[in-house]
């Protein structure tokens, strides 16, 4: 998630930290890509990310992604495919009239290149629980996670909390507001917290475009991140859903 933008694990949509408890229907392939630029007192870093999601069932989704598909920093060489993460996400229950939807995920992060300048240098594990609920036209996501960093050598733990509210403000146009915090992580990660705002546009059911900004609440490594993202759904099987679909974020 060299550690301006890419030192933090961000396993949700685009540069958002939070993610919804829902997944796409069985047989759906989603491709998410984003580009972000981060400012700090000493440098500017740019990074591109990619994430593939495939729903094996209406309750189980496999994910494969990288937060560092391409990384460019002031005064440093361009880096390609620096670290990948993969793992499953399991929906435990759908939201009801009273209770939220609940899901969990377990991801493993692996280095893909060596050298002291590599952004991903350790083998990490990410465990997260998700809760989502629609109330009065507003969609709410709450995430609690535990990152186990460098599990193969001198491990350290990092606590993650994030909450987001979103709603459709005009036809096909949505807005989201999010706050998040990363706490701990020893010497492997920087303390970070932020407030993020983004707008999304869905011109067709198979594509979503998002853009926004993320203001850092702690200025240890950065002050502002701006990003744009595109999600496409190239494969969507036509079949009856096994369970009711949740409202989109």
Image (cartoon, grey):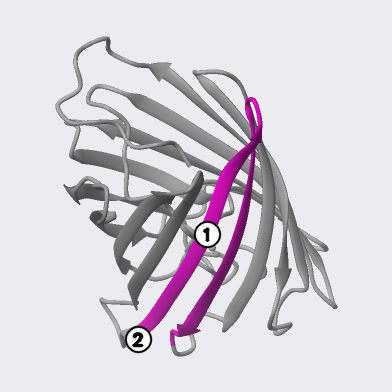
Query: On the rendered structure, is 172 left or right of 185?
Result: right
Say which element carries label 2.
strand
Query: On the rendered structure, is 40 left or right of 108?
Result: right
The answer to whether 206 is drawn above or below residue 174 in the figure is above
Say which element carries label 1.
strand
| Rendering quarter of residue 221 | bottom right
Q: Can residue 198 be seen in this view?
A: yes
- Using the image as rendered, state which of residue 90 and residue 6 is in the foreground: 90
Q: Main secondary structure of the magenta part?
A: strand
In the rendered image, residue 166 lying in the magenta stretch gets the answer: yes
**What stretch of residues is rendered in magenta?**
157-185
Residue located beneath label 2 in the image = 156
- Using the image as rendered, state which of residue 125 and residue 212 is in the foreground: 212
Residue located beneath label 1 in the image = 164
The answer to whether 169 is drawn above or below residue 102 in the figure is above
Query: On the rendered structure, is 171 left or right of 64?
Result: right
Q: Is residue 68 visible?
A: no
Which mark is nearer the camera, 2 or 1? 1
Residue 94 in percent (x, y) is at 22, 45
Q: Residue at x 45, y 69 (%)?
A: 121
- Using the image as rendered, state which of residue 109 and residue 77 is in the foreground: 109
Residue 195 in percent (x, y) is at 66, 68
Q: Which residue is drawn at 25% across and 56% down?
A: 99
């Amino acid at each position: 998630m060299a550690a301006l933008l890419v030192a933090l694990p961000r396993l949700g949509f685009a540069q958002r930290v939070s993610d919804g408890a829902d997944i796409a229907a069985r047989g759906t392939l989603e491709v998410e890509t984003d580009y972000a630029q981060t400012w700090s007192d000493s440098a500017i870093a740019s990074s591109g990310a990619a994430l593939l999601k495939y729903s094996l069932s209406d309750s189980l989704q496999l994910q494969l992604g990288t937060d560092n598909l391409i990384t460019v920093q002031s005064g440093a060489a361009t880096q390609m495919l620096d670290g990948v993460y993969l793992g499953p996400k399991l929906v435990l229950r759908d939201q009801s009239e009273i209770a939220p939807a609940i899901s969990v995920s377990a991801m493993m992060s692996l280095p893909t290149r060596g050298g002291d300048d590599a952004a991903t240098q350790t083998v990490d594990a990410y465990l997260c629980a998700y809760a989502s609920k629609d109330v009065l036209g507003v969609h709410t996501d709450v995430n609690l996670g535990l990152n186990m960093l460098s599990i193969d050598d001198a491990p350290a733990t990092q606590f993650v909390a994030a909450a987001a509210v979103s709603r459709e403000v005009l036809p096909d146009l949505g807005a989201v507001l999010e706050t998040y915090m990363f706490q701990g992580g020893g010497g492997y990660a920087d303390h970070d917290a932020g407030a993020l705002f983004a707008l999304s546009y869905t011109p067709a059911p198979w594509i979503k475009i998002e853009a926004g900004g993320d203001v850092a609440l702690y200025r240890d490594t950065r002050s502002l991140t701006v990003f744009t993202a595109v999600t496409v759904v190239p494969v969507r099987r036509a079949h009856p859903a096994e369970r009711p679909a949740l409202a989109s974020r």
